[in-house]
Image: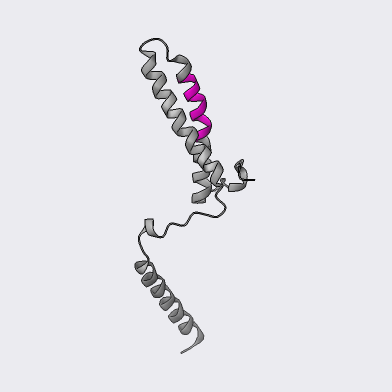
Amino acid sequence: MNKEEVDLEKESTTHLTQVIDEEQQPRFWSRFHPDPRLPIKTTLAAIALVFVGIGLTLWGIVLAAEGQGFLHFVLGFVTLTPGTYACVQLFGAYRGWRGYAFENIPSYDT
């Protein structure tokens, strides 16, 4: 056996070992480990802004039937916009999308 055949044999066994290891790993929800760089307070603030924004927007739409919901709708939209933006930025950084990084997100975790 020459050196090239030995290298090919090592590559094939390494690939086989990786396939076997991937099959034996537990399901997604049991192996989830949050990224330690993920800013927890910023994430919670972004999620809170989204939920408050959705609630105020829906409340404004319901009250609009009575002619009183315009300010709630505007406040909901103003709250929902930065919350959605921050959630998309956090998700993109977590997933490793190009152009997204945790360093680009303002953090409340001092």
For the C terminus, the image quarter is: top right
At a point 46% along the width and 33% down the height, the residue shown is 50
Placement of 38 over or under 106, stated as above or below: below
Q: Decide: is 28 above or below 107.
A: below
State which quadrant residue 27 falls in.
bottom left
Tell me the magenta residue range: 73-84
Q: Residue at x 50, y 33 (%)?
A: 49
Secondary structure mostly taken by the magenta-highlighted segment of the chain = helix
Residue 34 lies left or right of residue 65; in this view the side is right
Q: Choose between 55 and 24: the one closer to the eye.
A: 55
Q: Which residue of the protein is positioned furthest toward the top in this rendering?
A: 67
Q: Residue at x 42, y 27 (%)?
A: 55
Any part of residue 104 in sight: yes
Say which residue appears at 61% left-offset and 40% top-offset.
Answer: 106
* Residue 56 percent location from the top left of the image: 44, 24
Residue 25 x, y percent position in the rendering: 37, 66
**Magenta stretch: includes residue 89:** no
